[in-house]
Amino acid sequence: MNLKTEANGNLMVIFVREERLDAHNSEELKAEMNRLFEGGAKDILIDLKEVRFIDSSGLGVLVSGFKNASTRQGSLKLCGLQAQVRSMFELTRLHRVFDIFQTVDEALESM
Amino acid sequence: MKNKIDLEITVPNQTRYLSLIGKIGEDLARVVDNFRGDREALAHHLNMVLTEAVVNAIKHANAADPHKEVQIRISISDRELYIRVFDHGRGFDLNTVPPPLFNAAQIEEKGRGIFIIRSLMDSVVYKRAKGGNVLEMKKMLG
């Protein structure tokens, strides 16, 4: 899976550089989030702007990160959702759970 | 019957083929006749339900055994789109799969696949067939 992680102050930003986030590759994103949390990160932003398709496994991995962040008094935020991806958040009501921003810059401004 | 399409696809019981199956679903949505709705939405929904159904067969029914196979049949007629995903595993009871909890304090990592399929298709049935099981999904066209 093609992931790029950047530190931006205290915020760790993971860029998911894949067209699909699904049952085939989403465990790698989970492993990267866990690596960051275990390394002391509290706040993670996932940039999904290159992701055109997400399935229930991809959504599940983001929920896992959200729960992990919550137990550490941290946060997991999202940005760059394409229309099809957003529609799956809405279908599963997860758009009410996550803080979702248009861009990385917008997420940074909110902090 | 005019312009009937029948596809039969067999892939190894491995998630690396999900993208291929999903893309076939998307392309089918662009060629079906007699569909007046949003074709790009249909393409996305077929990608979704095929991905979810094949993952379900791989992980739950076939217990992630990479030597098993998943067989997919897609039939498109004037009136309906009919997708069947066959597994050769122990299966599960569709009716015991609970809907996901939507409350942020209670959300779980897993349990959205069947909910998504049921939301996007008009009928969903899972039953014994051919020495294994089949997940049957229908969507009305026209």
Image (cartoon, coloured by chain):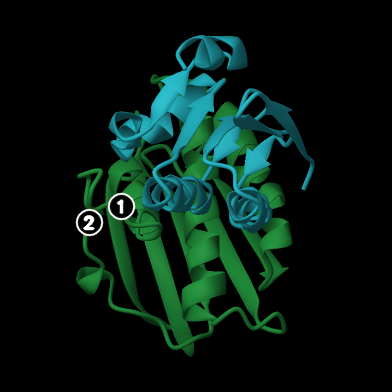
* Mark found first going from the N terminus, 2 or 1: 2
**Whether marks 2 and 1 lie on the same chain:** yes
Q: Is residue A91 above or below residue B118?
A: above
Q: In the picture, residue B12 is in which quadrant? A: bottom right
Chain of the residue displaying label 2: B
| Residue at mark 2 to residue at mark 1: CA–CA distance | 6 Å
Crowding near pointer 2: few (<14 within 10 Å), some, many (20+)? few
Residue A75 disc label: none
Q: Is residue B104 above or below residue A105?
A: below
Q: Which mark is residue B115?
A: 1
Quarter of the image with the C terminus of chain B is top left
Marks 2,1: beta carbons within 8 A: yes
User: Which residue is at 51% across, 33% downward?
Assistant: B44
**Which amino acid type is marked by label 2?**
Pro
| Residue ID at (49%, 20%) | A83
Instruction: Using the rendered view, name the quadrant where residue A80 is placed.
Output: top right
* Front residue of A34 and B75: A34
Q: Nearer the viewer, residue B98 or B142?
A: B98
**Residue receiving disc 2:** B99
Q: Colour of chain B?
A: green
Q: What amino acid type should be assigned to the residue bearing mark 1?
A: Phe
- Circle 2 sits in a helix, a strand or a loop, which is it? loop
**Letter of the chain that mark 1 sits on in the rendering:** B
Q: Position of residue A74 (x, y in %)?
A: 44, 40
Total numbered labels? 2
Instruction: In the picture, one chain is cyan; tell me its letter.
Output: A
Residue B45 appearing in the image: yes
| Residue in the picture at 28% in, 77% down | B93
Residue B85 place in picture, x, y as percent: 50, 65
Q: Is residue B132 left or right of residue A17?
A: left
Percent across and percent down for residue A61 are 51, 51
Residue located at (40% from left, 57% from top): B109
